Amino acid sequence: MQPQKVAESVALTDIAIRQAKAGPKAIKLADGGGMFLLVTPTGGKLWRLKYRADGLEKLLAIGAYPEISLGEARRRREEARELIALGKDPAREKQRAKVRARLNAADTFKAITDEYCAKRRRDGEKGWAPATAVRSEYLLSLVCGSIGKLPIAEIEPADVLMAIRRIEGKGKLESARRSLQLAGAVFRYAVATARLRSDPTRDLRGALTAPTVTHYGAITEAKKVGELLRAIDGYEGSGITKLALQIAPHVFVRPGELRHAEWSEIDLDGALWTIPAGKMKMRKAHVVPLSSQAVELFRQMHAVTGPQGYVFPSIRTRARPMSENTVNAGLRRLGYGTDEMTAHGFRAMASTLLNESGKWNPDAIERALAHGDTDKVRAAYHRGAHWNERVKMAQWWSEYLDTLRTGAEVVPLRRREQST
C-alpha cells in the first residue's frame, strides 16, 4: 500500500503532529531536508529520512514519535546529513553503532577480567602460580563488585577510583593498592585486544593512601629459634599442621610452595624435592635437597597422606591443599604473634643464620632460597656450581636446628673461610 503524498513546503509543528490522524493509507508529513513523519494506518508515527548514497535513494529510520520528539528528530536529521556530506551512509553507520553497542555490552569489566585471568593462568613460564592466581582473582573480584557490569569502554577514572576507595575505606590499604595494579593490567589487556583506547588507571597514580611497609615476623636469634622448635614439637593441634611446622624450618621454601607440595614431586629415596616452575614465584623449577631429618619428617607425613596427591591436604578434602592460614594459625596457637613469627619467617630465619655462620657461599644460600638472578648466564652457572654445596648445607642446617632444639650450647659462629 503506497503512502499518500503530502506537500513538503511547510515545516511541522508539535500541534500538527499530535493532531495527525491515521487513515486507510500511510500518510507522510514532511518537515524538510528529506525528513518526514510517517503516520501508519494503525496510528503509529515514525520519523524517516530520505537520502541518496552510492547513487541510490535510501530511507533511514530515525525513531518513533513521541519517544523521539520533533526537536530530537531534526537534530538526528542534521547528523545524518553531515555524514552524507562526508560521503558516508547514515544507515550503514547506524548499523555499525549497533554492532559496537552489542560488543560493548558483552565486553564488561567482569568479562574482560575473567578472560585476562584465564590467560595469566596458562601463560607458560610467565603464568601465575596457583596461589598468585587465587589471590589476584580475589582482589579483582573486589573491584568487580563495583564496576564489573559496566562496559569496559565506558569506565572512567572516577569509576575505578570509587571502586578502589571502597576497599581502602575498610582499612585494606595494601589490598587497595594491589587491586588498582591488577585493574590496570586488565584495562591494558583490553587496550592490547582492541576493546579499549586507553587505560583509565594511568591517571590515578598517587590517589591512594600508601600502606605502611611491614616485614614478615621472623625469629633469627639462635636461642629463640631453639625455643620455637621445642614449642613446635609440643604442638597439640592437627598432626598434619604439626608436621608442616616441623618440616618448614628444614626446607625454608615459600609458604605457598610448601602447602602446594605433591608427593609426585618428592623423591624420598633420592632426598630431592623438585618444585615445578608453575608453582614458583620466579617461574623457574626449583630443586630442594632434603636432609636426612627432612626425609624422616616427610616419611612420617607419607604414612598419613601418601602416596598420591597433596602432601599437606585440606582437612575438608584431599582435592585441595591446606589453607594458606594453617601454618600461621598454628604459630598463633603456640603463642607467637604476627610481629614475632610467620610462615614466611622460616626463610628469614634460614637466610640470617646461614649467612651468619660464615660457612657457606652467599650465592649458594641465595640459590637455596630460590631468589632470582637477572643474569641468565650467571644464574645457570650458579645452579650447577653450588649444588654440592647446597646438599652439604641442607644437612648442616638440619643438624644445627637439632642442636638448637636440644638447647645445647651454641658455639659462636665463624666467618666463612674464603676459597682460594
Image (cartoon, helix red, strand yellow):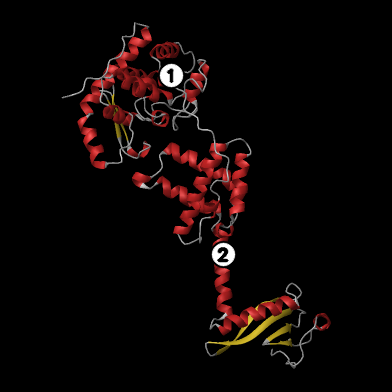
User: Would you identify the image quadrant in which residue 40 lies?
Assistant: bottom right
Q: Residue 2: image x %, image y %?
A: 69, 90
Q: Residue 419: image x %, image y %?
A: 18, 24
Q: Residue 390: image x %, image y %?
A: 25, 25
Residue found at x 54% / y 55%: 200
Which quarter of the figure is the C terminus placed in?
A: top left
Reading the image, the residue beneath label 2 is 102
Disc 2 crowd, CA 10 A, few/some/many (<14, 14-19, 20+): few
User: Would you identify the image quadrant in which residue 372 lies?
Assistant: top left
Nearest to N terminus: mark 2 or mark 1: 2
Q: Residue 114: image x %, image y %?
A: 50, 49
| SS state under label 1 | loop
Q: Are marks 2 and 1 in contact (CB under 8 Å)?
A: no
Q: Is residue 53 above or below residue 212?
A: below
The residue most toward the left is: 420
Label of residue 165 in the image: none
Q: Is residue 256 above or below residue 140?
A: above
Q: Is residue 53 left or right of residue 392?
A: right
Q: Is residue 242 left or right of residue 414?
A: right
User: Would you identify the image quadrant in which residue 300 lies?
Assistant: top left
Reading the image, the residue beneath label 1 is 219
Q: Is residue 171 in view?
A: yes
Q: CA distance from mark 2 to mark 1?
A: 58 Å
Q: Say which amino acid is labelled 2.
A: Arg
Residue found at x 34% / y 40%: 283
| SS state under label 2 | helix
Q: Is residue 363 left or right of residue 68?
A: left
Closer-to-camera residue (190/2): 190
Which quarter of the figure is the N terminus placed in?
A: bottom right
Given this view, does label 2 or label 1 mark the residue nearer the observer? 1
